[in-house]
């Protein structure tokens, strides 16, 4: 029952180093990529980052917050 406020866009090419092959139903191969979207709430703005674990250490990269529409205070 919430409306969308924004979309987060990030380049996942650096995360691709962590891709791991898996076997699914009937032995079909697929790849799994795990990452998190980190939201940072400031006093006047919303920032985002992409986060992932590589060789046991947390890595972070840039992400963009794209607002879907203008939000007006009521």
Image (cartoon, rainbow, N blue to C red):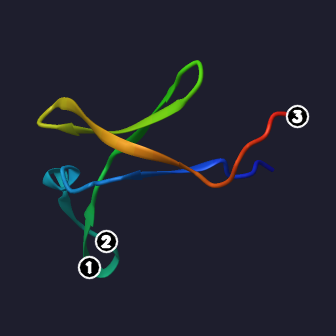
Q: Nearer the viewer, mark 3 or mark 2?
A: 3
**How many tags in the picture?**
3
Q: What's the CA distance linking mark 3 and mark 2? A: 49 Å
Q: Residue at x 30, y 81 (%)?
A: 26
For the C terminus, the image quarter is top right
Q: Residues within 10 Å of mark 1 (few under 14, many from 20)?
A: few
The residue located at (28%, 55%) in the rendering is: 33
Q: Is disc 2 surrounded by few (<14), some (14 to 19) or many (20+) residues within 10 Å?
A: few
Of tags 1 and 3, the one toward the viewer is: 3
Depth check: 27 or 20 in front? 20
Question: From what the image shows, is residue 21 above or below residue 3?
Answer: below
Q: From the viewer's perspective, is residue 67 above or below residue 40?
A: below
Q: Residue furthest top?
A: 43
Answer left or right for 49 relative to 15.
right
In the rendered image, residue 41, in percent from the top left (x then y), is placed at 54, 25
Residue at position x 28%, y 59% in the image: 32
Crowd class of label 3 (few under 14; some 14 to 19; many from 20; radius 10 Å): few
Label located before the other in sequence (3 or 2): 2
Residue 66 percent location from the top left of the image: 52, 50
Dot 2 falls on a residue whose secondary structure is loop
Q: Write down the residue under mark 2.
A: 24
For marks 1 and 2, give the CA distance.
Answer: 5 Å
Q: Who is closer to the viewer here, 22 or 74? A: 74
CA gap between label 1 and label 3 equals: 52 Å
Q: Which residue is painted at 76% across and 48% down in the image?
A: 2
* Label disc, if present, on residue 74 of the rendered structure: 3
**In the orientation shown, which residue stands out farthest toward the right?**
74
Q: Is residue 25 above or below residue 67?
A: below
Drawn side of residue 36 relative to residue 55, left or right: right
First reached walking from the N terminus: tag 1 or tag 3? 1
Give the label on residue 28, or none.
1
């Amino acid at each position: 029952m919430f409306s969308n406020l924004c979309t987060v866009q990030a380049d996942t090419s650096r995360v691709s180093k962590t891709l791991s092959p898996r076997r699914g139903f009937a032995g079909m191969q697929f790849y799994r990529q795990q990452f998190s979207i980190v939201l940072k709430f400031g006093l006047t703005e919303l920032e985002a980052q992409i986060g992932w674990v590589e060789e046991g250490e947390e890595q972070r990269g840039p992400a963009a917050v794209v607002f879907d529409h203008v939000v007006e205070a009521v």
